[in-house]
Image: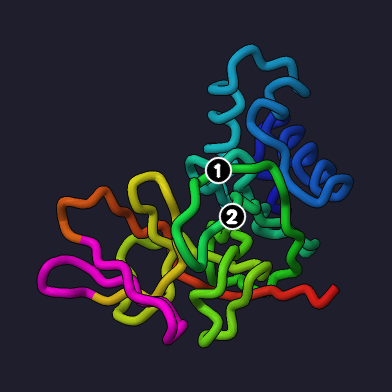
């Protein structure tokens, strides 16, 4: 019924995305869509994707290669694992091409991505070395929320508190000291913690 409102090319692209997800477990990139349909520029494919968004069949997260969701399809979807986040000393932020398959565990949170924890600064919040944390992009966290903070090119997972001179990133480990960040520091809050996945292998 929803496909009836689409142009023939929009319908072809929508069905291609749906088939791609069924076969691979994740959506194609814009370049893969353009290449499949012989569209010379990725911008040409983006125009069709924007039309699918306007017509309510698709949601896109800007700035991410595979962040599309077909709104009316029931199957499993995947999240990007962007790399490693420190739960100790900050580590260099490196993006990697890895996917985490989920089954609608977090339907209310859009743009979720996953990070693998390195370190033990959050163990009193039951977040251990090797866990996967699910992060919702959000730059204005509430007081005390666990956040992923980007500091001078490195990322860390800590609880967020506002201080008179800046912010305090508090570990959940009584043996470790907090990180104090002033307005002069190059810092961004990338997102807030929404879930933890642990493997006991």
Q: How many marks?
A: 2
Q: Residue furthest right?
A: 23
Disc number for residue 47: none
For the point 68% across and 67% down, the residue is 130
Q: In this orientation, which residue lies closer to the viewer: 95 or 40?
A: 95
Q: Residue furthest top?
A: 40
Mark 2 to mark 1: distance in Å? 7 Å
> In terms of sequence position, does the residue under pointer 2 or pointer 1 come before the other?
2
Magenta range is: 162-181
Residue indicated by mark 2: 84
Residue indicated by mark 1: 94
| Left or right, residue 13 beside residue 111 | right
Please identify the quadrant where the C terminus is shown: bottom right
Relative to 14, say whether 70 is above or below.
Answer: below
Task: Describe the colour scheme in one phrase.
Answer: rainbow
Please identify the quadrant where the N terminus is shown: bottom right
Q: In this orientation, which residue lies closer to the viewer: 53 or 98?
A: 98
Q: Position of residue 43 (x, y in %)?
A: 54, 22
Query: Tags 2 and 1 in contact by the CB under 8 Å rule?
Result: yes
């Amino acid at each position: 019924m929803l496909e009836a409102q689409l142009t023939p090319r929009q319908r072809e692209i929508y069905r291609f995305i749906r088939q791609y997800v069924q076969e691979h477990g994740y959506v194609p990139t814009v370049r893969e869509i353009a290449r499949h349909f012989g569209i010379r520029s990725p911008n040409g494919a983006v125009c069709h994707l924007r039309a699918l968004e306007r017509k309510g069949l698709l949601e896109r997260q800007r700035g991410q290669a595979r962040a599309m969701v077909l709104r009316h399809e029931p199957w499993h979807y995947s999240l990007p694992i962007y790399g490693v986040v420190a739960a100790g000393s900050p580590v260099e932020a490196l993006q990697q091409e890895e996917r985490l398959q989920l089954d609608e565990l977090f339907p209310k949170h859009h743009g979720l991505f996953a990070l693998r924890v390195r370190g033990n600064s959050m163990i009193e919040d039951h977040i251990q070395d090797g866990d996967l944390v699910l992060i919702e992009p959000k730059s204005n966290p509430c007081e005390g929320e666990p956040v992923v903070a980007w500091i001078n090119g490195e990322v860390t997972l800590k609880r967020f508190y506002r201080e008179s001179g800046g912010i305090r990133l508090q570990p959940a480990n009584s043996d470790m000291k907090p990180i104090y960040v002033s307005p002069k520091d190059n810092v961004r809050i990338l997102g807030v913690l929404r879930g933890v996945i642990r493997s006991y292998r």
